[in-house]
Amino acid sequence: MPIDGPALRILVIASRFPLASETFVRAQCAALVRAGHEVDILSLSQGDGAWSAGDLAAELPARTRCAHLEQPAVQRIALAPLRAAAFARHGVLAALRTLDPRLGWRSRSGQLAAIAHALAAPRRVDLVLAQFGPAGLVAIEMRRAGLVHGPIATAFYGFDLTRALRRSPEIYRALYEEAVLLLPNSQHLAGILQANGAPASKTFVHRLGIELSRFPAVDRHARTSPPIALAVGRFVEKKGFEHAIRAVAAAGEASTFRLRLIGDGPLRPRLEQLVHDLGVAHRVEFAGWRTHEEVAREMTAADALLAPSVVASDGDMEGLPLVVIEALATGMPVIASRHGGIPELVADGTNGILCDERDEHALAAALVALSDRDTRIALGRNARAAVERDFSADLLATRLVAMARALG
């Protein structure tokens, strides 16, 4: 992909990198590299994900430095003077600031010194791109300390605007003042941001991106076996998997779907017990955790995605789940809740079916409706076009760079 203008120097800040559950961050970094930009990644703590072929092609491991903030505070504090001294060879004032207790608890706890150690020298960049709101707050403190110089953009994806604001409504005031771009991934999250005081002039919806080549459109016309509905994600309340299981039971034999649950998490024992209690073990399968590549293969064999997301009791909710984008990219219809940013992509009766949150009878009716192969194919035919238009990682990287250049 040719560069429209000079290459930008971009520092991406992530709380943990790479993460198995945040492939969209890697897709964005790889797309920026493919576009010819100078991309470095600061991971505040160690990630849990394995590098994919696309990550390796973009040389993301070599571009990533980790501050290891997961280390015990006692260890960080003990190492802080040595780390500051090493950093002083490249920036004396910034090194001293990493130890200045007046800069707050990140200095007192040795976090700023650990970040300085990871960076090795002060960075002057064209854009600091923080992934999730909390990383944006770290970016501000890094800039105040002189560890990085450049405009800050912060992307928001869900919990960082729902659960975080419920716990601390004032948490992002500094970001609203000092960041130049606030990038929620849906109109729904943009509304939450602005209701919380974010300036409309800085707030722009910037979608999650996927590498379209990894999720090619699938021809499902010739299938004769019982259809498979996938539900993918961590087994936590906001995913709504309990309601998916109850919907399968409510639909009964009127639906030919088999539900395949991919993932794991704290609610797994409860969900397994529910399947047993409802007598649907012959129609619900727990497939366990799968890598991103394995999920992509699972989607080629499936016929619909079930995403019955809900607002959790602690206020946590989805922005626009990546799995919905990926499923639609394969030409698969989606049954989902009217939740978060999902209705911004899933159009009821066009490329999927939308239901109210926790409405298990509506979910069951949707499973019955899509048990008809022709209906599934008709909805799936419309699925990929919206993804190609608004969710290509390469296209979104181009849009992001255009916004960054407009700042200057």
Image (tube, rainbow, N blue to C red):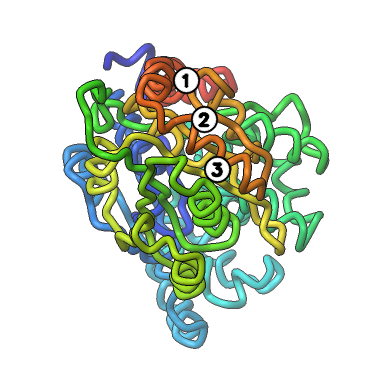
- Of labels 1 and 3, earlier in sequence is 3
Amino acid type, mark 3: Ala
- Of labels 3 and 2, earlier in sequence is 2
Pick the residue in front: 201 or 257: 257
- Percent from the top left, x then y, of residue 200? 76, 27
- Of labels 2 and 1, earlier in sequence is 2
Neighbourhood count class around disc 2 (C-alpha, 10 Å): few under 14, some 14–19, many 20 upward: many
- Percent from the top left, x then y, of residue 87? 41, 64
Q: Quadrant of the N terminus?
A: top left
Number of labels in the image equals: 3
Amino acid type, mark 2: Arg
Q: Residue at x 22, y 41 (%)?
A: 297
Amino acid type, mark 1: Asp
Neighbourhood count class around disc 1 (C-alpha, 10 Å): few under 14, some 14–19, many 20 upward: some
User: Which element carries disc 2, helix, strand or loop?
Assistant: loop
Report which residue position mark 3 lands on: 364
Report which residue position mark 2 lands on: 207
- Percent from the top left, x then y, of residue 323? 42, 41
Per the model, the C-alpha gap separating discs 2 and 1 is 7 Å
Pick the residue in front: 187 or 35: 187
Q: Residue furthest front?
A: 253
User: Which element carries disc 3, helix, strand or loop?
Assistant: helix
Pick the residue in front: 394 or 78: 394
For the residues bearing labels 3 and 2, Cβ distance under 8 angstroms: no
Per the model, the C-alpha gap separating discs 3 and 2 is 30 Å
Q: Disc number at residue 390?
A: 1
Q: Quadrant of the C terminus?
A: top right
For the residues bearing labels 2 and 1, Cβ distance under 8 angstroms: yes
User: Which element carries disc 1, helix, strand or loop?
Assistant: helix
Pick the residue in front: 126 or 302: 302
273 to the left or right of 109: left
Q: Residue at x 43, y 78 (%)?
A: 71
